Image: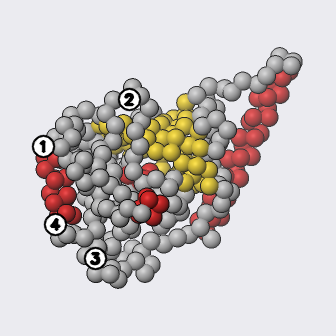
């Protein structure tokens, strides 16, 4: 309840200030140019925030970006095509494990070797179900958190910070609306994100300072180093019903060139629930699941 109240309070304040500013600006333009259509100012803020809707995707893998963006996401190993549970139910084919293409020439040798070792472990059944952050209650990091499916994330937009809040486990990511990173950034799950608005429909996010333990670029367990630099462009599509993310990751220690990937969300018109991943999330079928995160000391 506290979380929902915070979302409602922040959204209400932002909506009131935005409406007030918009009405005033509209009156000025209308007075100066009677009968003229109101143009969207170049620094307009796209309406991403509400207590009444979030943004949801039912796809948990990166999609190909538009043409001209260079190398796309890491794909499944051609020898081991991937079939998701949803696709298996739809087509009648048995679901398969995610086995990434470690032979992709964009990978540095160490990254290819690590992916191959992870694949071998999964294929040998030493680990029946490979690690997936959303399945085992870990944060997805950046950019992996954008792949969390089937539950929406919500946005709070304030003059200095944009908050992205996931319904599952209420993970909160903060994007500071400034143009400079800190001189020293301590690595963390979501790193340090700074952002700006563009063209009245896009939030551009620049992130550094990402920790690497149990963190991957995708669900094929593509690794990275602390040199990872992520740029996300979240664009509200015309009509306001869909949000598209174009994500570019650069890591000279892991990739021979940048990767550019796409994710897309639909507007989920529902209020935020408080779902908890770890409740009753045990290894009931003895599949050797990756252990749930557990604090080593009390917070208070």
Q: Position of residue 242 (x, y in %)?
A: 59, 44
The earlier-in-sequence mark between 2 and 4 is: 2
Closer to the observer: label 2 or label 3? 3
Q: Quadrant of residue 236?
A: top right
Q: Which residue is mark 1?
A: 109
Q: Is residue 64 left or right of residue 153?
A: left
Task: Sort mark 2 into few (<14), some (14-19) or many (20+) by Cα contacts within 10 Å.
Answer: some
Residue 66 seen in the current view? yes
Residue 176 seen in the current view? no
Indicate the secondary structure of the residue bearing disc 3.
loop
Q: Residue at x 49, y 65 (%)?
A: 168
The earlier-in-sequence mark between 3 and 4 is: 4
Q: Is residue 17 left or right of residue 187?
A: right
Q: Which residue is mark 3?
A: 287
Q: Which residue is mark 4?
A: 124
Q: Residue at x 62, y 55 (%)?
A: 268
The image shows residue 54, relative to residue 105, as above or below, that is below
Q: Residue at x 65, y 41 (%)?
A: 240
Q: Which residue is mark 2?
A: 69
The earlier-in-sequence mark between 1 and 3 is: 1
- Colour convention of the picture: secondary structure
The earlier-in-sequence mark between 2 and 3 is: 2
The earlier-in-sequence mark between 2 and 1 is: 2
Give the distance between the C-alpha atoms of the residues marked 2 and 4, in whole angstroms.
36 Å
Looking at the rendered image, the quarter that the N terminus falls into is bottom right
Give the distance between the C-alpha atoms of the residues marked 1 and 3, in whole angstroms.
31 Å
Q: Residue at x 18, y 43 (%)?
A: 103
């Amino acid at each position: 309840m506290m979380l929902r109240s915070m979302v409602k309070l922040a959204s209400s304040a932002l909506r009131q200030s935005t409406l007030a500013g918009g009405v005033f600006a509209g009156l000025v333009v209308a007075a100066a140019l009677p009968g003229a259509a109101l143009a969207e100012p170049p620094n307009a803020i796209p309406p991403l925030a509400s207590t009444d809707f979030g943004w949801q995707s039912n796809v948990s893998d990166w999609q190909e970006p538009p043409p001209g963006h260079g190398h796309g996401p890491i794909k499944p190993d051609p020898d081991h095509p991937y079939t998701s549970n949803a696709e298996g139910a739809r087509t009648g084919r048995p679901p398969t494990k995610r086995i990434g293409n470690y032979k992709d020439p964009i990978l540095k040798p160490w990254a290819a070797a690590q992916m191959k070792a992870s694949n071998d472990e999964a294929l040998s059944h030493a680990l029946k179900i490979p690690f997936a952050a959303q399945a085992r209650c870990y944060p997805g990091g950046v950019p992996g958190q954008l792949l969390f499916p089937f539950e929406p994330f919500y946005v709070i937009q304030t003059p200095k910070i944009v908050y992205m809040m996931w319904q599952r486990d209420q993970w909160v990511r903060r994007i500071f609306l400034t143009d400079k990173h800190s001189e020293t950034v301590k690595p963390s799950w979501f790193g340090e994100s700074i952002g700006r608005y563009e063209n009245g429909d896009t939030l551009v996010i620049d992130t550094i300072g990402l920790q690497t333990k149990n963190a991957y670029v995708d669900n094929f367990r593509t690794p990275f180093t602390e040199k990872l630099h992520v740029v996300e462009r979240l664009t509200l599509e015309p009509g306001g019903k869909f949000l598209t993310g174009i994500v570019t990751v650069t890591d000279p220690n892991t990739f021979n060139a940048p990767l550019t990937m796409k994710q897309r969300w639909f507007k989920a018109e529902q209020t935020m629930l408080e779902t908890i991943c770890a409740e009753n999330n045990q290894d009931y079928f003895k599949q050797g699941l990756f252990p749930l995160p557990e604090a080593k000391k009390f917070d208070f």
